[in-house]
Protein backbone atom coordinates (compact mmCIF):
# COMPACT_ATOMS: atom_id res chain seq x y z
CA UNK A 1 0.00 0.00 0.00
CA UNK A 2 2.87 2.36 0.84
CA UNK A 3 4.42 1.67 -2.55
CA UNK A 4 1.15 2.48 -4.33
CA UNK A 5 0.81 5.75 -2.42
CA UNK A 6 4.38 6.70 -3.33
CA UNK A 7 3.73 6.04 -7.03
CA UNK A 8 0.47 8.02 -7.08
CA UNK A 9 1.97 10.93 -5.16
CA UNK A 10 5.06 10.93 -7.36
CA UNK A 11 2.93 11.04 -10.48
CA UNK A 12 1.05 14.09 -9.18
CA UNK A 13 4.30 15.87 -8.31
CA UNK A 14 5.88 15.16 -11.69
CA UNK A 15 2.79 16.04 -13.68
CA UNK A 16 2.62 19.46 -12.05
CA UNK A 17 6.34 20.15 -12.43
CA UNK A 18 6.39 19.12 -16.08
CA UNK A 19 3.18 20.87 -17.14
CA UNK A 20 3.14 23.94 -14.88
CA UNK A 21 6.79 24.50 -13.93
CA UNK A 22 5.96 24.37 -10.22
CA UNK A 23 3.33 23.76 -7.57
CA UNK A 24 3.56 19.97 -7.32
CA UNK A 25 7.06 19.92 -5.88
CA UNK A 26 5.71 21.38 -2.65
CA UNK A 27 3.76 18.14 -2.13
CA UNK A 28 6.94 16.06 -1.78
CA UNK A 29 7.61 16.88 1.89
CA UNK A 30 4.06 16.17 3.19
CA UNK A 31 4.03 12.94 1.17
CA UNK A 32 7.33 11.82 2.67
CA UNK A 33 6.26 12.76 6.21
CA UNK A 34 2.61 11.69 6.38
CA UNK A 35 2.40 8.89 3.80
CA UNK A 36 5.91 7.42 3.90
CA UNK A 37 6.79 7.92 7.56
CA UNK A 38 9.86 10.16 7.26
CA UNK A 39 10.85 12.79 9.82
CA UNK A 40 10.66 16.44 8.67
CA UNK A 41 14.47 16.63 8.42
CA UNK A 42 14.60 13.42 6.38
CA UNK A 43 11.72 14.56 4.20
CA UNK A 44 13.20 17.95 3.32
CA UNK A 45 16.43 16.20 2.27
CA UNK A 46 14.66 13.45 0.34
CA UNK A 47 12.45 16.05 -1.32
CA UNK A 48 15.53 17.65 -2.89
CA UNK A 49 16.26 14.38 -4.69
CA UNK A 50 12.67 14.02 -5.90
CA UNK A 51 12.37 17.63 -7.00
CA UNK A 52 15.87 17.96 -8.48
CA UNK A 53 15.81 14.81 -10.62
CA UNK A 54 12.22 15.40 -11.71
CA UNK A 55 13.01 19.00 -12.67
CA UNK A 56 16.08 17.91 -14.64
CA UNK A 57 14.16 15.30 -16.64
CA UNK A 58 11.26 17.67 -17.11
CA UNK A 59 13.66 20.36 -18.35
CA UNK A 60 15.09 17.97 -20.95
CA UNK A 61 11.59 17.08 -22.14
CA UNK A 62 10.55 20.74 -22.24
CA UNK A 63 13.78 21.60 -24.08
CA UNK A 64 13.04 19.04 -26.77
CA UNK A 65 9.63 20.67 -27.18
CA UNK A 66 11.40 24.03 -27.60
CA UNK A 67 10.11 25.53 -24.34
CA UNK A 68 13.38 26.18 -22.50
CA UNK A 69 15.66 29.21 -22.66
CA UNK A 70 18.72 27.42 -21.29
CA UNK A 71 21.06 30.40 -20.98
CA UNK A 72 18.60 32.40 -18.87
CA UNK A 73 17.72 29.42 -16.72
CA UNK A 74 21.36 28.68 -15.97
CA UNK A 75 22.12 32.32 -15.11
CA UNK A 76 19.11 32.58 -12.77
CA UNK A 77 20.01 29.25 -11.17
CA UNK A 78 23.61 30.30 -10.53
CA UNK A 79 22.41 33.53 -8.92
CA UNK A 80 20.17 31.43 -6.64
CA UNK A 81 23.02 29.16 -5.47
CA UNK A 82 24.02 31.46 -2.60
CA UNK A 83 20.51 31.38 -1.16
CA UNK A 84 20.38 27.59 -1.48
CA UNK A 85 23.58 27.22 0.55
CA UNK A 86 22.30 29.55 3.28
CA UNK A 87 18.91 27.81 3.41
CA UNK A 88 20.39 24.32 3.64
CA UNK A 89 22.68 25.34 6.49
CA UNK A 90 19.84 27.07 8.36
CA UNK A 91 17.54 24.05 8.04
CA UNK A 92 19.93 21.85 10.05
CA UNK A 93 19.69 24.28 12.98
CA UNK A 94 15.90 24.53 13.22
CA UNK A 95 13.59 22.35 15.33
CA UNK A 96 11.61 19.88 13.21
CA UNK A 97 8.21 21.09 14.49
CA UNK A 98 9.12 24.64 13.50
CA UNK A 99 10.17 23.29 10.10
CA UNK A 100 6.76 21.73 9.51
CA UNK A 101 4.85 24.82 10.64
CA UNK A 102 6.94 26.96 8.29
CA UNK A 103 6.23 24.47 5.53
CA UNK A 104 2.48 24.57 6.20
CA UNK A 105 2.53 28.37 6.02
CA UNK A 106 4.45 28.22 2.75
CA UNK A 107 1.96 25.75 1.28
CA UNK A 108 -0.95 28.02 2.14
CA UNK A 109 0.83 30.93 0.47
CA UNK A 110 1.63 28.89 -2.62
CA UNK A 111 -1.94 27.65 -2.88
CA UNK A 112 -3.25 31.20 -2.64
CA UNK A 113 -0.82 32.44 -5.30
CA UNK A 114 -1.75 29.56 -7.59
CA UNK A 115 -5.43 30.39 -7.13
CA UNK A 116 -4.86 34.06 -7.99
CA UNK A 117 -2.83 33.11 -11.07
CA UNK A 118 -5.53 30.65 -12.11
CA UNK A 119 -8.24 33.33 -11.86
CA UNK A 120 -6.18 35.81 -13.89
CA UNK A 121 -5.45 33.31 -16.63
CA UNK A 122 -9.10 32.31 -16.69
CA UNK A 123 -10.06 35.90 -17.54
CA UNK A 124 -7.34 36.22 -20.19
CA UNK A 125 -8.00 32.90 -21.89
CA UNK A 126 -5.37 30.50 -23.26
CA UNK A 127 -2.19 32.01 -24.67
CA UNK A 128 0.18 30.44 -27.17
CA UNK A 129 3.36 32.45 -27.34
CA UNK A 130 5.87 32.42 -30.16
CA UNK A 131 9.44 31.67 -29.21
CA UNK A 132 10.81 34.84 -27.60
CA UNK A 133 13.65 36.82 -29.04
CA UNK A 134 16.45 38.16 -26.87
CA UNK A 135 15.58 41.57 -25.48
CA UNK A 136 18.00 44.16 -24.13
CA UNK A 137 20.40 42.45 -21.68
CA UNK A 138 20.26 43.41 -18.02
CA UNK A 139 23.99 44.13 -17.79
CA UNK A 140 26.44 44.85 -20.63
CA UNK A 141 30.16 45.67 -20.58
CA UNK A 142 30.81 46.39 -24.24
CA UNK A 143 31.09 48.85 -25.91
CA UNK A 144 30.28 50.65 -22.62
CA UNK A 145 28.98 49.49 -19.26
CA UNK A 146 25.20 49.63 -18.91
CA UNK A 147 22.90 48.23 -16.24
CA UNK A 148 19.13 47.84 -16.11
CA UNK A 149 19.48 47.89 -12.35
CA UNK A 150 15.79 47.60 -11.33
CA UNK A 151 15.53 44.39 -13.35
CA UNK A 152 18.87 43.16 -12.03
CA UNK A 153 17.75 43.76 -8.43
CA UNK A 154 14.45 41.99 -9.05
CA UNK A 155 16.27 38.94 -10.41
CA UNK A 156 18.81 38.95 -7.56
CA UNK A 157 16.21 39.19 -4.79
CA UNK A 158 13.87 36.61 -6.32
CA UNK A 159 16.66 34.16 -7.14
CA UNK A 160 18.02 34.41 -3.60
CA UNK A 161 14.55 33.76 -2.13
CA UNK A 162 14.14 30.75 -4.40
CA UNK A 163 17.48 29.38 -3.25
CA UNK A 164 16.66 29.95 0.41
CA UNK A 165 13.34 28.12 0.16
CA UNK A 166 14.89 25.26 -1.77
CA UNK A 167 17.68 24.81 0.75
CA UNK A 168 15.57 25.34 3.86
CA UNK A 169 12.38 23.43 3.04
CA UNK A 170 13.37 21.20 0.14
CA UNK A 171 10.91 22.77 -2.31
CA UNK A 172 11.53 23.75 -5.90
CA UNK A 173 10.25 27.31 -5.67
CA UNK A 174 8.65 27.28 -9.11
CA UNK A 175 5.88 29.55 -7.83
CA UNK A 176 8.57 32.22 -7.44
CA UNK A 177 10.77 31.29 -10.39
CA UNK A 178 8.03 31.47 -13.01
CA UNK A 179 6.90 35.04 -12.14
CA UNK A 180 10.55 36.14 -11.89
CA UNK A 181 11.29 34.79 -15.35
CA UNK A 182 8.13 36.45 -16.65
CA UNK A 183 8.87 39.87 -15.17
CA UNK A 184 12.63 40.00 -14.73
CA UNK A 185 13.78 38.18 -17.86
CA UNK A 186 10.76 38.91 -20.09
CA UNK A 187 9.88 35.30 -20.92
CA UNK A 188 6.37 34.31 -22.04
CA UNK A 189 4.54 31.98 -19.64
CA UNK A 190 5.08 28.76 -21.61
CA UNK A 191 8.85 29.38 -21.76
CA UNK A 192 9.01 30.51 -18.14
CA UNK A 193 7.48 27.20 -16.99
CA UNK A 194 10.02 25.12 -18.92
CA UNK A 195 12.99 27.33 -18.04
CA UNK A 196 12.08 27.29 -14.35
CA UNK A 197 12.85 23.57 -14.30
CA UNK A 198 16.50 24.35 -15.11
CA UNK A 199 16.63 26.70 -12.13
CA UNK A 200 15.00 24.16 -9.82
CA UNK A 201 17.46 21.44 -10.85
CA UNK A 202 20.45 23.71 -10.10
CA UNK A 203 19.21 24.92 -6.70
CA UNK A 204 18.11 21.44 -5.60
CA UNK A 205 21.50 19.94 -6.46
CA UNK A 206 23.26 22.72 -4.56
CA UNK A 207 21.12 22.34 -1.43
CA UNK A 208 21.48 18.54 -1.50
CA UNK A 209 25.26 18.84 -1.71
CA UNK A 210 25.28 21.12 1.35
CA UNK A 211 23.00 18.75 3.30
CA UNK A 212 25.07 15.63 2.45
CA UNK A 213 26.23 13.95 5.65
CA UNK A 214 24.25 16.31 7.89
CA UNK A 215 21.51 14.76 10.05
CA UNK A 216 19.76 11.43 9.49
CA UNK A 217 19.43 10.11 5.95
CA UNK A 218 15.94 9.50 4.56
CA UNK A 219 14.64 6.09 3.51
CA UNK A 220 16.24 6.08 0.08
CA UNK A 221 14.03 3.24 -1.17
CA UNK A 222 10.86 5.29 -0.67
CA UNK A 223 12.58 8.39 -2.06
CA UNK A 224 13.69 6.55 -5.21
CA UNK A 225 10.20 5.14 -5.87
CA UNK A 226 8.72 8.62 -5.46
CA UNK A 227 11.42 10.07 -7.72
CA UNK A 228 10.93 7.50 -10.48
CA UNK A 229 7.15 8.00 -10.58
CA UNK A 230 7.61 11.77 -10.50
CA UNK A 231 10.22 11.79 -13.27
CA UNK A 232 8.11 9.71 -15.63
CA UNK A 233 5.09 11.93 -15.00
CA UNK A 234 7.19 15.07 -15.59
CA UNK A 235 7.89 13.92 -19.15
CA UNK A 236 4.16 13.47 -19.73
CA UNK A 237 3.50 16.84 -18.12
CA UNK A 238 5.95 18.61 -20.43
CA UNK A 239 4.16 17.12 -23.43
CA UNK A 240 0.79 18.25 -22.06
CA UNK A 241 2.13 21.79 -21.63
CA UNK A 242 3.27 21.83 -25.25
CA UNK A 243 0.03 20.54 -26.74
CA UNK A 244 -2.85 21.66 -24.53
CA UNK A 245 -4.28 24.44 -22.40
CA UNK A 246 -3.18 23.66 -18.82
CA UNK A 247 -5.68 25.88 -17.00
CA UNK A 248 -7.86 22.99 -15.82
CA UNK A 249 -4.83 21.05 -14.63
CA UNK A 250 -3.59 24.13 -12.79
CA UNK A 251 -6.96 24.54 -11.09
CA UNK A 252 -7.00 20.93 -9.91
CA UNK A 253 -3.49 21.22 -8.48
CA UNK A 254 -4.42 24.46 -6.73
CA UNK A 255 -7.22 22.69 -4.86
CA UNK A 256 -4.90 19.79 -4.02
CA UNK A 257 -2.14 22.05 -2.68
CA UNK A 258 -4.61 23.99 -0.50
CA UNK A 259 -6.07 20.75 0.88
CA UNK A 260 -2.65 19.33 1.73
CA UNK A 261 -1.65 22.68 3.23
CA UNK A 262 -4.67 22.64 5.54
CA UNK A 263 -3.95 19.06 6.60
CA UNK A 264 -0.28 19.83 7.24
CA UNK A 265 -1.22 22.87 9.34
CA UNK A 266 -3.68 20.88 11.48
CA UNK A 267 -0.94 18.32 12.21
CA UNK A 268 2.01 20.68 12.60
CA UNK A 269 0.64 23.56 14.68
CA UNK A 270 -0.65 21.46 17.65
CA UNK A 271 2.71 19.64 17.77
CA UNK A 272 4.52 22.97 18.04
CA UNK A 273 2.22 24.26 20.78
Image (cartoon, helix red, strand yellow):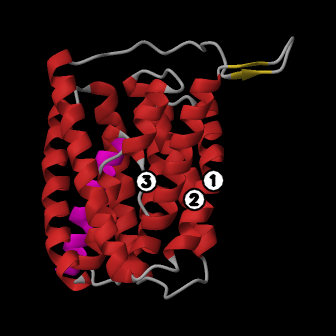
Q: Residue at x 57, y 25 (%)?
A: 151
- Looking at the image, is mark 3 or mark 1 earlier in the sequence? 1
Query: Which class describes the residues within 10 Å of circle 1: few (<14), some (14-19), or many (20+)?
Result: many
Q: CA distance from mark 3 to mark 1?
A: 13 Å
Numbered disc 1: secondary structure:
helix
Direction from residue 199 to residue 253 in the image, left or right:
left
Q: Residue at x 60, y 13 (%)?
A: 135
Contact? badges 1 and 2 (CB < 8 Å) = yes
Numbered disc 3: secondary structure:
loop
Q: Residue at x 42, y 65 (%)?
A: 169
| Residue holding disc 1 | 81
| Residue holding disc 2 | 84
Q: CA distance from mark 1 to mark 2?
A: 5 Å
Q: Is residue 8 magenta?
A: yes
Kindly tell me whether residue 73 is visible in this rendering. no
Kindly tell me whether residue 189 is visible in this rendering. yes
Q: Nearer the viewer, mark 3 or mark 2?
A: 2
Contact? badges 3 and 1 (CB < 8 Å) = no
Query: Which class describes the residues within 10 Å of circle 2: few (<14), some (14-19), or many (20+)?
Result: many
As drawn, the label of residue 172 is 3
Q: CA distance from mark 3 to mark 2?
A: 11 Å
Residues shaded magenta: 1-18
Q: Residue at x 12, y 49 (%)?
A: 255
Amino acid sequence: MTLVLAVVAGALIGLSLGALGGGGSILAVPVLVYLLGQSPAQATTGSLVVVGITALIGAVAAGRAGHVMLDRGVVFGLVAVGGAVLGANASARVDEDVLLVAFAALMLLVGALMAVRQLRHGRQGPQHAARPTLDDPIITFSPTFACACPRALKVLVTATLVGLLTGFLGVGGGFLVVPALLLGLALPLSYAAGTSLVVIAITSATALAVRAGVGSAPDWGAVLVLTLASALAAVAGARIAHRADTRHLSGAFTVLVLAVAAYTATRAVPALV
